[in-house]
Amino acid sequence: MIENRPVSLFFSHLVLVLGVAVVAFPLWITFVASSHEAVRMTQVPLPLLPGDQFFTNLKLVLFQGLEGSGSPPVGMMLFNSLIMAIMIAFGKIAISLLSAFAIVYFKFRFRMFFFWMIFITLMLPVEVRIIPTFEVVANLGLLDSYWGLSVPLIASATATFMFRQTFLTIPDEMLEAARIDGASPMRFFFDILLPMSRTNIAALFVILFIYGWNQYLWPLLITTDRDMYTVVMGITQMLEAAEQAPDWHLIMMTALMAMLPPALVVLGMQKLFVKGLTETEK
Amino acid sequence: MLKRVHYRGSLLPFLLVAPQIAVTLIFFIWPAGQAVYQSFLVEDAFGMSTEFVWFENFAELSEDPYYLDSFLKTIVFSVLVAGLSMGLSLVMAAMADRVIKGKTAYQTLLIWPYAVAPAIAGALWVFIFDPTLGIMTYALGFLGYDWNHKLNGGEAMTLVVVAAAWKQISYNFLFFLAAMQSIPKSLIEAAAIDGAGPAKRFWTIILPLISPTTFFLLVINVVYAFFETFGIIHSVTQGGPAKATEILVYKVFNDGFVGLDLGGSAAQSVILMGIVIGLTVIQFRYVEKKVEY
């Protein structure tokens, strides 16, 4: 703050509070809806204050799910989402670390060729090549499996770029010292490079976990077995069922469950998250 | 980009890049090639025979009024999403940059929508604007406005724009705030001493200096609106009513998986790939340029 202007400062706070209120409004409505019983959720106007059925609804949704929607209990979908998100995040980090290590620390034939090949993945999101990718996964027999949900999404140019950037800032003396001490390349990788990139790995993990958790189109296409549904795609099934019988209190409880884990990750690791976001994208 | 001190080639580096390259080849390059190949084919109604037709699928698309209409809608949609979301977050970032206390608290309260999946964001907004039960529908009814996005295309578009922009506010806010905080305080102080008020400083110093970030965000937001809003459209309107919200990504899915027009859908995929490639090139060519302070 440069000068003392109480009125303009007050105005700034006012705008921010209003902004936060607008942004948080849907969350509040979701929470309120998830804490009422079915009957109350069919009466206009809908409540603006929470009711007392939150835990009843929570139990119902987690262990039984929404009847007539064709989706499994939400507990199961949450578990599937968790597995998928973790597999994607770990997979991306692992293969990107290795390829960035090769590209930065080794001189070998086709180095630049491989680099550009990885770069291309940046330009081909799932959404633009859905049908052929679906065919490949179907031919490999990976439909309705955790591998099918995660492996096609784990090639990542952004993660490779970020690790490349990180490795380039690590002083050359590190490798020289390791060599003098007789460390093999893999020993150097595990004992020096990995520990030195710890924060970057953690920051990237936050971003990639959210990316994986929030996948929608891909699980929608390749899962037909309801035991493999993820929670984010399960919500659409429920919305379709809502055309006949709007069990909004249960749908909103599911929505709440679906956004809670990634939101907690973002808020709990806010610093890492901001770092990861601003560094991977730029 | 190669380290000055490095290892000589052997088998190891190939093994290290192998997993990444394998995934890229199997799930990216090959399918993309297939999409390009299929876009030159026409399959008969029973899938019995295919015919190589060169650019016929593309020619057909260029004359298909539905496709052109969808293109136009995608442009309107992304301009509205980018404009609304960037506008709101710019204002909030400017305010957060000014306050002394509570900057982090505001940031915490504003960043969580980033974590919400597009489909879930759609579900929240659909509930709020539900034609019979929704709270906003009720409030609008009070004002004498009859809201029904299931019948009215314009309202459906408004709803998906609001849901998509809402989700993107956190991202834009973070980047705007970071850009504003990296401007040297001495510049702002000098302007203040010269008698420039907060508004004047914002327009003549802050806004020009954050222009690279603004441009970067514009590209990112357009990419987001083009490709990542599938979940929102699918959960809110399913492209309806009467294709009013059928943006390009949704149309590829709809024509390919629901309509089973493989050639046409593949041709649309190829066009979309062209757009992503164009946007990525723009991003890399121009965003890297930094403003000199």
Image (cartoon, coloured by chain):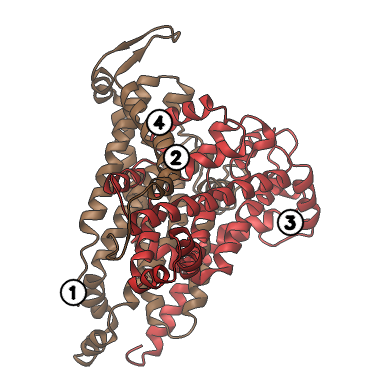
Chain colours: A red, B brown
Same chain, labels 4 and 1: yes
**Residue B49, above or below A111:** above
**Separation of disc 2 and disc 1 at Cα?**
40 Å
N-terminal label among 4 and 1: 4
Q: In the figure, residue A233 lies in which quadrant?
A: top right
SS state under label 4 = helix
**Separation of disc 1 and disc 3 at Cα?**
53 Å
- Image spot of residue A215 (x, y percent): 52, 45
User: Which amino acid, mark 2?
Assistant: Val
User: Which amino acid, mark 4?
Assistant: Lys
User: Which amino acid, mark 3?
Assistant: Ser
In the image, what residue occupies the spot 57% across and 57% down?
A26
**Residue B55, above or below B245:** above
Residue at numbered disc 1: B292
Same chain, labels 2 and 3: no
Image depth: mark 2 or mark 4 in front: 2
Image depth: mark 1 or mark 3 in front: 1
Residue at numbered disc 3: A35
N-terminal label among 2 and 4: 2
Residues under numbered marks 2 and 4 in contact, where contact means CB atoms less than 8 Å apart: no
Residues under numbered marks 2 and 1 in contact, where contact means CB atoms less than 8 Å apart: no
Quarter of the figure that contains the N terminus of chain B: bottom left
- Image spot of residue B129 (x, y percent): 55, 47
N-terminal label among 2 and 1: 2
Q: Residues within 10 Å of mark 1 (few under 14, many from 20)?
A: few
**Separation of disc 2 and disc 3 at Cα?**
44 Å
Which residue occupies the foreground of this view, A82 or A245?
Answer: A82
User: Which amino acid, mark 1?
Assistant: Glu
Which residue occupies the foreground of this view, A113 or A88?
Answer: A113
Chain assignment, label 3: A
| Residue B116 can be seen in this image | no
